[in-house]
Structure formats: C-alpha cells, structure tokens
Amino acid sequence: MRPLLLVLICEHYSIDNKQALIISQLGQRDILKHLGYDSGKAALKFIDKLTLTFARDLELKHVKKQLDVRFSRYKVFNHYSTINYVALSLDNRYPFLTGTKLGLAISTANGLTRGPLRACLADTLTLGIELGVNDPAKRVSQLSSLNELEVLHQYWIDRRNGLRREQNRPEDADKPYPQLIAAEPNIVPIEDYDQLFNEGVSQKHCIAIYHSRIAAGNYCVFVMPQPQRVTIGIKIDRQNGRIELDQIAGMRNALATNETREIVYSWLERVKRTLKI
C-alpha cells in the first residue's frame, strides 16, 4: 500500500535480505517504529500526501528527516493536501515559511518560475539583513503571495540603492552635465548624476560609472523609450570635434534589436551634420 516503507526497509537492510523480509511482514506503523521513525497515524497520512518521484537522492533524505522520531517535523505539513519536493526543500532551507501563505504559494508555483522565485527569496532575506531590518525572516513569512514578495524585494532594493547613492555620491553630483549633442523627442539626454544613477538602477546596468567622463564633457548618455527601452552611450572627442557610438544597452545590458539600432544610427547621422563642439 505504501511503497516508501519498502524503500526505507531496503535502505536500512541493504545487504541483509532475510532481515529485510522479516521486517516487511510487520504492520506499517511497526515498520516505521522499528526503523526509528515516528510511527503515529499522522506519519502514515504524511506519507500518503507525498507526490515525489525519488529521482533525486535528496528527496528520500528530506522524507527521512521529516519522519525522524526525535523531531516529527512532518507535523508542520498537517494542513497540506499534497507535499511535493519544492515544499520539502523549502522547509529544509527556510523552515519559517512552511505552513504560511507564501510557503504554499512557492511550493505550488509553476515549475518554470520556481528557480527565479527562490533566488528572489534568498536575495530578499539578504537585503533585509544588509538594511538592518528587525527579523527579516519574520517579515517575509508574513507575506501572503508571490506578488507581495516581489514588491518587498524591489522596495528593499530601492532602499539599498538609495543608501549607496548617498554613500558614494560624487562631490560634483549637483552640477548639470554639459549638453553637447542635440536631442530628439524620443532620444532624451541624461542631465545630471541623479538621473544617471536612476537610469542604472531602473535598467540594472552600471552606466553610473561614466559620471566623471560625462562631467568632463567626454561622454554623453541618452535614453530612448521606444520601440525598445535602451540606454545610449556616446563617446566625445572634443579635440577633433567627433562623436562615436559606444553602446546601446537594454535591460541588464540586453542587446538592442535591429529596429532600435537603425533608429539610433539614423539619429546619430543627423547629429553629426549639426555637431558643434
């Protein structure tokens, strides 16, 4: 009725077939007790809720840990209708989430999103510690959905970036940037350090490192929202009065589409004809 019990018996008596056969003749709760696991009726109910393939060695390890008679950890899953590998691995790493609305949401999320979701969870807890939040684990455990987790994650990212901006703010951050290249309605210049920093935050790239070059008049940065949201970097050779396209970066430095590149190239050619440095 419960093949998992046979697995546990054969693992315990891996070379003693005779003893394994003797133990397999016992009642199911007696088998669990003999092997050193919790033998209550609730333990059998826990086993019946498992939806595992045991394709991973960790699956059996997680189950054995749950059934360990010293802890009977499996009882935290009493109100789960089914228990999959994600639920067990989440309990192993973040036990404070088991039984919460967020824990249930993560364990039942689509398989294609589980990796990024767990990465988001780990990053959120790290951010909370970095920001000095009082008991970030408890704060996360109070969330009700994946959407709330993403909102909190972004909020703590913004707080962290705000602190870093103040700590690393250049002395000339309040000075406006030289406007040496003509803009257009769809290609807008970055005008100061705060805009440059925010562009790097929103697009998740490191455009802010160009501040000194921009302030010196050797570089310009523009933002183009359509048809693709990109950051445009232009090198400026003031001595020879020349400009050169340095980068067209999308979100997380994603490559620009052909359509986007053609628009930028056309704009740059128009700029070169009227350039006055």
Image (spheres, rainbow, N blue to C red):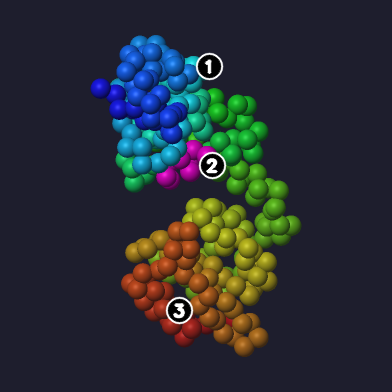
In this view, which residue lies farthest toward the top?
40
* Magenta-colored span: 115-123
Magenta stretch holds residue 87: no
119 over 202 or under it: above or below: above
Residue at figure coordinates x 35%, y 24% from the top left: 21
Considering the numbered disc 1 on the image, is that residue within a helix, a strand or a loop? loop
| Residue 142 sits above or below residue 240 on the image | above
Q: Are marks 1 and 2 in contact (CB under 8 Å)?
A: no
How would you classify the magenta stretch by its main secondary structure?
helix
The numbered dot on residue 268 is 3
Q: Secondary structure at mark 2?
A: helix
Q: Quadrant of the C terminus?
A: bottom right
Residue shown at 42% from the left, 67% from the top: 255
**First in sequence: mark 3 vs mark 1:** 1
Residue assigned mark 1 = 70
Query: What residue is shown at x 42% (from left), y 45% (from top)?
Result: 115
Instruction: Tell me the kind of residue under disc 2.
Output: Asp
Report crowding for label 1: few under 14, some 14 to 19, many 20 or more residues within 10 A (C-alpha).
few
The image position of residue 129, as x and y in percent, is 63, 35
Q: CA distance from mark 1 to mark 2?
A: 32 Å
Amino acid bearing label 1: Arg
Q: Secondary structure at mark 3?
A: helix
